[in-house]
Image (spheres, rainbow, N blue to C red):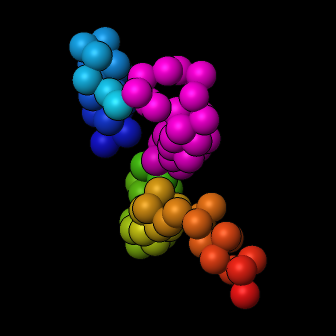
Amino acid sequence: MRLLLAGLFAYASAQGLLIEALARPDSEEVAAVRRKFTPTIVAYAATVAVGLLIPIAAVAVYFGITLFVVTPFRQVIRLLRRR
């Protein structure tokens, strides 16, 4: 899935289909996306290896990866600091 998204991002970038904030490779938005998704490649690879040995553990790790990817940690931290 990650490789498919990376390919889609590269295609959209080459065709000029990205919004202005993402079109600049040095933008903070692009850096945030890379910081968030780069560790997932390693996690997915490790989970495949774990899945060969302990399938139930692999399901739990995939669930954890999903939570990591979809959780907007910066917004959650901002909300918690306001309180």
- The image quarter containing residue 5 is top left
For this rendering, which residue is in front, 25 or 70?
Answer: 25
Question: Residue 33 versus residue 20: which sits nearer the camera?
Answer: 20
Horizontal side of residue 57 vs 4, given as left or right: right
* Position of residue 9 measured from the top left corner of the image (x, y, whole percent): 34, 27
Report whether residue 18 is seen.
Answer: yes
Q: Is residue 29 above or below residue 18?
A: below
The residue stretch that appears in magenta: 20-45
- Which of the 4 quarters of the picture holds residue 15? top left
Residue drawn at point x = 49 percent, y = 21 percent: 24
Answer above or below: position of 29 versus 73.
above
Give x and y (percent) for residue 3. Answer: 35, 32
- In reply to whether residue 34 is colored magenta, the answer given is yes
On the image, which quarter does residue 38 sit in? top right
* Magenta run includes residue 8: no
- Using residue 79 as the reference point, say whether residue 58 is left or right of it: left
**Residue 83 position within the rendered picture, expressed as x and y whole percent measured from the top left:** 72, 87
Number of callouts: 0
> Is 63 rendered above or below residue 8?
below
The residue located at (27%, 28%) in the rendering is 8
Relative to residue 75, is residue 69 depicted above or below? above
Q: Name the residue located 57 percent from the left edge and 28 percent from the top edge.
A: 27
